[in-house]
Image (cartoon, coloured by chain):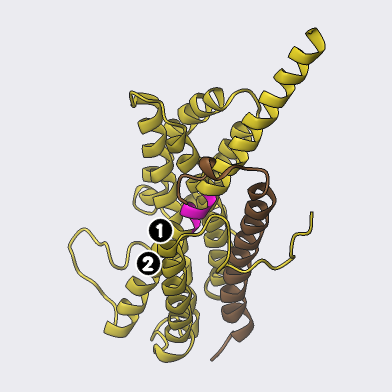
Chain colours: A yellow, B brown
Amino acid sequence: MNIHPFPSPVDTPTGTRASRGLGIVVFLSMVLLTLLGLVLTDEDVVQGSTVRLMYIHVPAAWVAYLAFIVTAIASAMYMWGKQHSLTFDRIAGASAEVGVIFMGLSLVTGSLWGRLTWGTYWQWDPRLTTTAFLFVTYVGYLAVRDLGGSHQQRAKRSGVVALLAVLEIPLVHFSVVLWRSLHQKASVLQPNGNVTMDGLMLFTLLFGVAVFTLLFVWMVLHRQRVLTLADAIDDGGLEAALQERRNEAN
Amino acid sequence: MDHVSFIVGGYVVTFVAVGAYVLRMFRQARKFNSAIAESDKPWR
């Protein structure tokens, strides 16, 4: 089978007209975000140019939270839905996979930012430690999905893990309030409603959150379709093995 | 801009990681696609 090493994102079996349109919007928005983040926004009076990492670090962390919440909701819909539709399970799996990528990116970009502002790549600080724990938990979730068994067994088993794992998110988010942390507290979502950020910087941050959210939707859309194809191949393989057994018996 | 390598490096790592994941995903899609009937692709 000849598979091109760099397949075109425009011509893929999991694409539709709508997903291609979304992909183009996401790509152009990412280019604009990079321009805004690296060139057009001013440096911060306290942090200087290092603030430019915020425009990818915060959106990456946001998408990871969102992805894990979507995983939990989709798992609940599988478990308590009347049909026990595997589509929900595949959405849960796709979302968790994308979430792990973005949680990892949040840790890496945060580590680079930490080296510049704190003088170290890593500290066993409450926010960093709980985030690393969340990352490992969802790597574990993906491992549980690969344990084998039927698709329904996979969905039930991983659904339970997803519903437990999502409880870690409030702990991560509020870790900077609950414990003394090196990590800064919320700049935008403060309890008193004050936003202490320059207009273009705030716009770029919110734009980054919106662009990463659209990127997440696009990635999950394609990934869950790939998982649908993979499940269909598994089912086909099982059916072929059963047919072979029947032929041997006759 | 100070600390260019760290800052641009952060952006590059992000885009390369997402790009690599997407390429791997599309390669899998192509690999599986030929073995699957159109009826098993509800988005088509």
Q: Position of residue A87 (x, y in %)?
A: 45, 37
Q: Are marks 2 and 1 on the same chain?
A: yes
Q: Position of residue A43 (x, y in %)?
A: 42, 87
- Residue lying furthest left in this view? A192
Count all numbered tags in the image, as a single digit. Answer: 2
Relative to residue B40, is residue A47 depicted above or below? below
Q: Quadrant of residue A136?
A: top right
Q: Position of residue B28 (x, y in %)?
A: 66, 52
Cβ atoms at labels 2 and 1 below 8 Å apart: yes
Q: Position of residue A15 (x, y in %)?
A: 51, 59
Residue at 43% x, 41% y: name it: A71
Q: Amino acid at mark 1?
A: Trp
Which numbered disc flags the more N-terminal residue, 2 or 1? 1
Label 1 is found on which chain of the structure? A
Q: Amino acid at mark 2?
A: Val
Residue nearest the observer in this picture, A196 or A97? A97
Q: Which residue carries the number 2 mark?
A: A209
Relative to residue A192, is residue A166 depicted above or below? above
Kindly state the secondary structure of the residue where label 1 is placed: helix
Residue at 50% x, 29% y: name it: A155
Residue at 41% x, 73% y: name it: A25
Q: Position of B10 compared to A63: left or right? A: right
Q: Which residue carries the number 1 mark?
A: A62
Q: Which residues are magenta?
A: A219-223
